[in-house]
Structure formats: structure tokens, C-alpha cells
Amino acid sequence: MCLFLHFILKNNICNLKNSLSYNFTMKEKFLINGGKILSGEIEVEASKNAYLPILAGSILCDDEVTFLNAPYFTDIENMCEILKILGVKIRRDGEVLSLDLHNIKNEKISHEHTNKLRASIFLLGPLLAKFRQASISYPGGCNIGTRPIDIHISAFKSLGVKIVERHGYIYCNAQNMRAGKVVFSSISVGATESVMMSAVLLKGKTTLYNVAREPEVKELANFFNAMGAKISGAGSDRIEIEGVKRLKGVSFKVFPDRIIAGTHLLLGAMLGKNMRVIGARREDNEILFNILKECGCSLEEDEMGATISSNGKYNACRFIETLPYPNFPTDLQPQFMAFQTLGKGTSVIKENLFENRFNHVMELVKMGADIFVKDRLAIVKGVEKLYGADVFASDLRAGAGLVLAGLVAEGYTTISNIEYIDRGYERLEEKYARLGADIKRVKE
Ligand code: EPZ
């Protein structure tokens, strides 16, 4: 009984600590005076959604790993905090992040950490591969949906992992985990990545079917193969992993963040005059590149990126729906909707991935957008102009969409809860100000 009380008490104390620390950190907001034409160059940071599983997976190496272009996203900082709990010694010198992985220990990953970072679930696979057991609290669902992990759990069970879910924790025993075949019940980026990592040191061949094909999955496989793993097929619908005995340390550079690249291109499609996005690659955003041209924007591609210009007058894109790669990415849906609010005509946007990813709609409507939502559909009727307003970011990509809307709107816009935006964009206001935008970070 006393153990149970201890657990409840500890849990409440850490929640209280969380809320106190949350209230004590000074809140900030963006102040934007919209309508400025933007030009010049902007460089895309390395991919958040590649770095997060790569950082989690690095614990499978018992050497030193150096990352050469680690951005200052708070999601990456939070993942590093969890790695420190597991005994990883971390040094950061600018964008160079060095991990000393010689003394990894298996610790329980508590709610305090998993609540801040959905990607904490990526540690499950590596912990099972290294220690054959793991205890991790359910990852936080953010505002875009419940974010279940049933696909992760059933995939691990099919490799012989024993899993008990109790009091918000997942207790896994992988003593009997064996190489074999996993057929995912539906496509999940995180589950593909976590299970792929769990098989890297597993004796024999493991084959994964019905996997996510996102470029971040491929980049994760590239990282492991650079350390001596034997992973083939990443980026296709079937991945094969031949277990190896150990992994050697490497220096690694992660590819550009395709969602940040898409965000900048959409900004350029509204306000750009020869705005060059360094790191924007057609192979990561084929559909977006095609849509921007069809909408009437000028998009010149070169070996380093793409230059976009727009006269601010463009056609609406009649229909787009978010689906797993190579289809239109859900992480660009809010930014794309901001772009479509000023399109000539009506655009229908269908959000298939997350059940609650239209939180930005009300905020865009406050700015004069004409949007009607029914279930998973948003009908966006283009208007002449958006007008500045006081709006609130509800999640990372909704916040990015509101920044685009504020930059194009007439008058002043404030965007609160910008800590969401800092999770996946690095000092966005400074980068956009260098293109000519009138945007500042101020105290709430
Ligand atoms: C990754 O999340 C990304 N996050 C998300 O980016 C991205 O939106 C998502 O993939 C889809 O592309 C990272 O890589 C850190 P999923 P993940 O498992 O792995 C359902 C951002 O803004 N599902 O592919 O959590 C799930 O609810 C973030 O950078 C289950 O039902 O996404 C969703 O409807 C937001 N059971 C769908 O599958 C599960 O066990 C796709 O989710 C797992 C997922």
C-alpha cells in the first residue's frame, strides 16, 4: 500500500513541479506587422523528425557519435534530457552535438518526460534491443489527436516481446524477442522506426511489411548503416534488417527538414520576390512543388534549393488530402491552409491522419478567412485579404500556419503560445526578419 501511495504522491509532486516550472518560465509571443514583400535567402535546418528517432537510436552504439548539424529545436533539447537520464554524456558546440555512449543504463522513462515529447516512444525499440526490457510512460498526446501506440505494441508482441500496460506505464520484457516477420496493421512512422531499431542487434533477419516510407525513415536507416547495421529497403513498403553484433561510432549529418522547407516555400508563394530556400528539395516535397507551380507561382530549382516568387495572386488548389508519404504531408496542412485562404476560388482540404488537426481554423477565421469545417474536411473559400488579430498557437504546425497568415495579413497580429513553434523551428522570427518581415519575439 505504501509503495502505491509513494507512487501517487511522487506523480503528483512532479505534476505540481511541472506546472510551477511552466508558470515560472516567462511566456513570449510574436508581434507581426504584416504585408511586407520578402526576398533573400533562408536556409532550412536539419530534419526534426529524423533527428528524434536517430538520437533515440544512438543508445544502441557503445561508442561516441557526433552530429554535425543539430538544430536548436526544443524537441531535440528534450530528447537530449531523456538521453542524459540514460547515462549519455552530451556536449554541444554550436550545431555540433557529441554523444558519449559508453555508459548507458536502463532507466524508467517517466511521465514527466514522455508528456513533453511524443517522440519519447522512439526509445522503446532501442531499450528493448539493448537491455531486453523497458518501462516507459505513455507518450503525451498533443492537441492534434490521441496519438495511440497500439500499432507499436502489436508489432513488438509479434516479435515475442511480453508487454503489460498498467497505471499509464508500458512494461516490456524482451528476453524471448526473436527476429521474424512484422506486418503493421496500418502505416505508422513512429512504429516503423521504433521496431526497425529494435531489430538492429537482433540475431537473424527481421522483415517489416506495410511500413511508413517517409524520407525520415530512410535517413534513420542511413544513420544505422553508417554505424555498421544491415538495413535494406527503407523508403519502400518492405524493410529487412539483418542483426549485427555491435555498432561503431560515427560523425553524421542529417538531411534538411522537408516540413520547414515546405513552410518557407508556402510563405514565398504568398509574399516572395526571388526568395531562395536553401535545402528545399523536390524529392522531399514533390506534390507541393507541383501545386505551387499549378497555383501560378514561379519556382526555380537549383542544386542547393529553390527560388520562389509570387505576385500574391494565385489560384486555389481545388482539393488536397493528407496521406502517408509520398502523398501530401499532414505536417504541412495548417501552413497550406493559410496559403489557401487567399487563393482565387475554393479549396477543399481533407485531413486523414489526425482527428483533431484543424485547431488553427478558428484562429484563421479571426483574421478574416472564410473556412467551413465538417468532420475531416475544411472548405476554404479564398478572400481578398486577411486582417491582423490576436491569435493562439495550439500546436507546432498550427502555430507555423498562423505565422504565415500574420505575415500576409494587413495590420498587426500577435501569436501567443509560441513555445509550440519553438519545438520545431529555430528562432523563426529572426530568420523571417532577415527576409524583410516585420516580426518580433516579445514578452506576453
Ligand atoms: C510522426 O508522428 C511525426 N512525428 C509527426 O510529426 C507526423 O505528423 C506523423 O509521423 C505522420 O507523418 C515524428 O516523427 C516525431 P504515425 P507519429 O504513427 O509517428 C495513428 C510534427 O509536427 N497511430 O505515423 O506519431 C495516429 O494516431 C509531428 O512534426 C495509431 O493509431 O505518427 C495517426 O492517425 C506531428 N496507433 C496515424 O496512425 C499507433 O500505434 C499516423 O501516425 C501509432 C499511430
Image: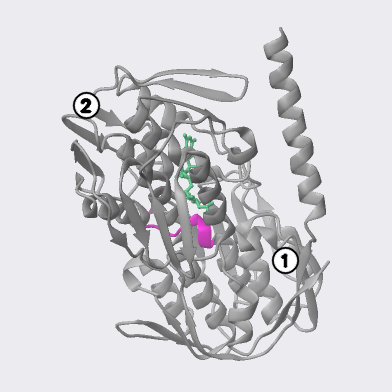
Is label 2 or label 1 in front?
A: 2
Which segment did they paint magenta? Answer: 324-332
Mark 1, residues whose alpha carbon is within 10 Å: few (<14), some, or many (≥20)?
many
Task: Please name the residue that numbered disc 2 is placed on.
Answer: 180
Q: 370 above or below 155?
A: below
Tell me what residue is drawn at x 29 percent, y 54 percent: 223
Q: Is residue 206 left or right of residue 186?
A: left
Q: Quadrant of residue 229?
A: top left
Q: Residue at x 31, y 43 (%)?
A: 62
Quadrant in which the N terminus appears: top right
* In this view, 60 is above or below 333: above
Task: Write down the residue under mark 1.
Answer: 364
Task: Please tell me whether residue 326 belongs to the stretch shown in magenta.
Answer: yes
Q: Position of residue 256 (x, y in %)?
A: 40, 68
User: Mostly what secondary structure, the magenta segment?
Assistant: loop
**Residue closer to the observer: 140 or 387:** 140
- In this view, the residue in front, 239 or 203, is 203
Q: Secondary structure at mark 2?
A: loop
